[in-house]
Amino acid sequence: MSSKVRVAIIGVGNCASSLIQGVEFYRNARAEDYVPGLMHVNLGGYHVNDIEFSAAFDIDKEKVGYDLGEAIWRGQNNTVKFAEVGSLGVPVHRGMTHDGLGKYLSEVIVKAPGPTADIVKILKDTGTDVVVNYLPVGSEMATKWYTEQILEAGCAMVNCMPVFIGREQYWRQRFEERGLPIIGDDIKSQVGSTIIHRVLTRLFQERGIKLEHTYQLNFGGNTDFLNMLERDRLVSKKISKTNSVLSQMQHEVAAEDVHIGPSDYVPWLKDRKWAHIRMEGKAFGEVPLSVDLKLEVHDSPNSAGIVIDAVRCCKLGLDRGLSGALEGPSSYFMKSPAFQVSDERAHELTELFIEGKVGAACISDPESPVQRRSPAVPDPARVTAADQTPVSSQA
């Protein structure tokens, strides 16, 4: 059992840059202090400083072959710089393209020459514990190909993209068979448009307001938004964001009354994202009630705050011999987990997971042992059948 969390990255874009900067920025944070920006300085015995970057993969000729500490400032990356990052001694290897390079990205990114690196060998040789998938939205085939490499290499996975791996029974079973944990799918930012929309939707539900119409319009200036101008790549993203919000409701809303998804690309915003949310409903006496909200964030640091915890939860899963989807952390960190619960409940289950009081299947099977290799008895009273909301694999 290593005292470090060895992390490999697929896709050295803005999100990778923010994660790497964050590890440097919080390297000397005191575990006993309240540290703004972090949910956990120490998570289950792992400090932020215990995260080490072991390998990286990309296809951009501006990044492949460069040290990871330099590559995060190259190419089309345009997120905010909040930490100095020196040489990490980790080269960016040539990755697999598949469908990872869409119509608009191919206009600004030139593929690096040469063959795809031996992903499995690199992951094994570098002692990688956890692989973070940061591929562009719409990279369905590329994500599944990389997932096969991750399984073969014997690593845990954090799937930050809206390609459904962790929520699907087929892939969950594959990770279970290999004795490996996964957290997925589609990262839910620390305080982003999805979690705000979810919480407000839950508030409407719990306070007796009937939500009748809602939209969430998102636009920004990073390559993620440029890539999503290609509407065919948006199918899984819209499903993920929409289901995440509607899962907090008990009554149905017609499809034409809900619009949630990326809307446009504004280059001068760079890595900033603006989200406009509107909710219309009926309150007491069926009197109309509406909410209008605008959120402004730096997109990539907002998600890095979640990933910095997700990789450590995966390492805890490896340490404890857990396999398959880590249901508590997935429900808290991701938009499309296998089981949707309220964010309050998801937070509680994640804290219980970190403390070692519940195992991987704490929602679907609350009596599952905390440790498969050394079974312990969790507290089944902490997880009830009412909390279980399975997600259909039919998109």
Image: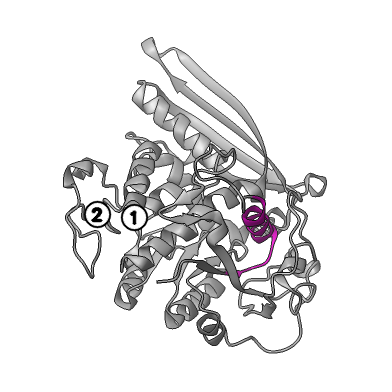
Task: From the image, tell me which residue sits under label 1.
Answer: 327
Q: Would you place residue 220 above or below residue 229 in this image?
A: above
Of the pair 243 and 22, the residue shown nearer to us = 22
Give the main secondary structure of the magenta stretch.
Answer: helix
Q: Write the residue at 56% across / 74% down.
A: 142
Q: Is residue 11 magenta?
A: yes
Q: Is label 1 in a helix, a strand or a loop?
A: helix
**Residue 247 falls in which quadrant of the image?**
top left
Q: Which residues are magenta?
A: 8-25
Q: Write the residue at 36% across / 71% down.
A: 180
Q: Would you place residue 237 above or below residue 139 in this image?
A: above
The amino acid on which the numbered mark 1 sits, given as a three-letter code, is Glu
What crowding class fits label 1: few (fewer than 14 Cα within 10 Å), some (14-19), or many (20 or more)? Answer: many
Task: From the image, tell me which residue sits under label 2.
Answer: 364
Give the image location of residue 161, x and y in percent. Answer: 54, 60
Any part of residue 147 in sight: yes
Q: Are marks 2 and 1 in contact (CB under 8 Å)?
A: yes
Of the pair 85 and 197, the residue shown nearer to us = 85
Q: Quadrant of the N terminus?
A: bottom left
The amino acid on which the numbered mark 2 sits, given as a three-letter code, is Ser
Q: Is label 2 in a helix, a strand or a loop?
A: loop
Q: Is residue 107 left or right of residue 225?
A: right
Give the image location of residue 324, x and y in percent. Answer: 33, 66
Q: Write the residue at 69% across / 70% down.
A: 88
Q: Is residue 185 left or right of residue 81?
A: left
Colouring mode (rainbow / by chain / secondary structure / one colour): one colour
Q: CA distance from mark 2 to mark 1?
A: 8 Å
Q: Is residue 142 magenta?
A: no
Give the image location of residue 377, x and y in percent. Answer: 16, 55
